[in-house]
Amino acid sequence: MKKLLLIVIASLTMMACTSKDYIERESHSFNYAGTLAPLEVSIWQYGTHTLTTEAGGFYAVKSDAVDLNKYNNMLVEVEGNLMDGYPVDSGPEFLDVVAIQPVKE
């Protein structure tokens, strides 16, 4: 009986951890519109570009999926994920872009 109880508790614990991880990953996804610019001199050491959103948000940005240089200084809409462990070095949140498209004005 004790073994069965331990198996049930362990199973419930594993299910709870898996659900939590899934929810956290989902909460890190994003879809923002803003102006993309190449990263210049900064106090933080991550990202290749910055994104300044229409609402005034500011993010460090990188992408392994698309060439961000094609969208320098353009108003764009980006899809991707917030990188865990950021911000650091007094920098902004860090976005990993998986898709990008210009915004037609």
Image (cartoon, rainbow, N blue to C red):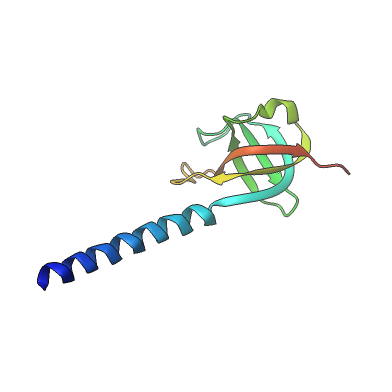
The picture quadrant where one finds residue 66 is top right
The residue most toward the left is 2
The percent position of residue 11, horizontal first and vertical second, equals 27, 63
- Asked whether residue 58 appears in the rendered view, the answer is yes
In the foreground, 76 or 20? 20
The percent position of residue 42, horizontal first and vertical second, equals 57, 34
In the foreground, 26 or 57? 26
Q: Quadrant of the N terminus?
A: bottom left
Asked whether, in this view, residue 91 is left or right of residue 49, the answer is: left
Asked whether, in this view, residue 50 is left or right of residue 7, the answer is: right
The residue most toward the right is 105
Q: Residue at the location (64% across, 46% down)?
A: 58
Asked whether, in this view, residue 102 is left or right of residue 98, the answer is: right
Q: Residue at the location (12% across, 67% down)?
A: 3
In the foreground, 83 or 57? 83
- The image shows a total of numbered marks equal to 0
The percent position of residue 35, horizontal first and vertical second, equals 74, 40
- Asked whether residue 93 appears in the rendered view, the answer is no
Q: Residue at the location (53% across, 36% down)?
A: 43
The picture quadrant where one finds residue 14 is bottom left
The percent position of residue 60, horizontal first and vertical second, equals 59, 39
Q: Residue at the location (86% across, 42% down)?
A: 104
In the foreground, 62 or 57? 62
